[in-house]
Amino acid sequence: MPADLAADLAALSAAAARADAHHEFIPKITWPQGVRMAVNVTLDFDAMLLRRLMNEPPSQLGKGEFGGRVGIWRMIALFDSLGIKGTVFTPGRIVELYPEALRHAHAQGHEIADHMWEHHVPKDPTLERDHLRKAAAAIESITGRRPVGTRSWHSQALLQEEGFIYNSHGHAHHLPHYHRDAGTGQALLNIPFHYVIDDAMFYSFAWLGSQNPAQRISDPDRVADMWWDAFWQQYQQGGYLNIVMHPFVSGRALRVAMMERLLRRMQAMPGVWFPTSEELARHILATHPAKGA
């Protein structure tokens, strides 16, 4: 083997080892009795906030507004009709804009969790802390308690200092796992999702400022087939699936109808558990605690 190639491989191996040291995986998760597989149904309730951050045109802002005025209500009604408890990850600013929708979701038993203050994390540590605390206070004003879960880029040490027990953000594994902070060494549970099970990747025209060649609006039945295949693969293994939806995307009538068909099909399988993200996190923390916890 050439010396330069051997050096490159050694460097890659060392980098992989350093990254691996920050993760603690759970080889086989034990679900509650009678459960074969867990499915988290989650909403990223951004409304028009992300569109504003990206300085997108009024047509895109209007699409976001639809999520707050119509989409969120349709999605919560869908979950309620199926008896499924979901998790709504919401920025603090959206709590200010659409408090009635979030009060309704909370009253129906759905979890309201953090999704940053303005859908981004400031680089300044003092401002980051201020954003996290303002978002938590906004959610507490709706639910009466501070959130314990987040879907965010907030620094792990700050999240744990503020009492969060999980983040639903990283993709290092398909099963819930722990991530250790490089500074403190503390482990935080990560409940992973992947963009292949994210509605915006398939339905959202002009997603994240993409240009015309990158546009896509998929047939809902095509998305249903792909998501069912992902579910079925994990069902056979006794695993896990995190379904990510945005009210301004999946709140459209034809997509609500598709999700109803898909979720009913999942519910028809024996042993499928639909917990909130907090319920899932507390189960794993109790039955599979991090090493040294």
Image (cartoon, rainbow, N blue to C red):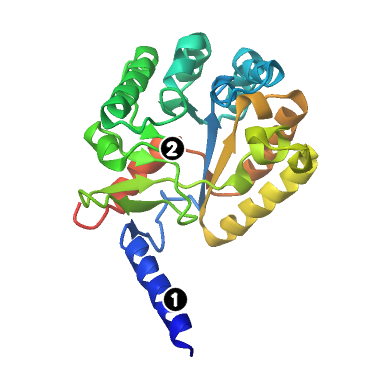
Q: Position of residue 270 (x, y in %)?
A: 58, 49
Residue 8's disc number: 1
67 and 284: which one is in front? 67
Task: Name the residue at 71% across, 18% down.
Answer: 59
Q: Which comes before the other along the chain, label 2 or label 1?
A: 1
Q: Position of residue 52 (x, y in %)?
A: 57, 20
Label 1: which secondary element:
helix
Task: Name the residue at 35% across, 48% down.
Answer: 284
Q: Three-letter amino acid code at disc 1?
A: Asp
| Disc 1 residue crowd, few under 14, some 14–19, many 20+, Cα 10 Å | few
How many labels were placed on the picture? 2
Q: Position of residue 22 (x, y in %)?
A: 32, 57
Is 164 left or right of 200, judged from the image as shown? left
Is residue 196 placed above or below 102 in the rendered structure? below
The image quarter in which residue 151 lies? top left
Is 258 left or right of 82, judged from the image as shown? right
The image quarter in which residue 57 lies? top right
Q: Three-letter amino acid code at disc 2?
A: Ser
Label 2 belongs to which residue?
277
Task: Name the residue at 73% across, 32% down.
Answer: 205
Task: Name the residue at 47% across, 47% down.
Answer: 192
Is residue 208 placed above or below 177 in the rendered structure? above
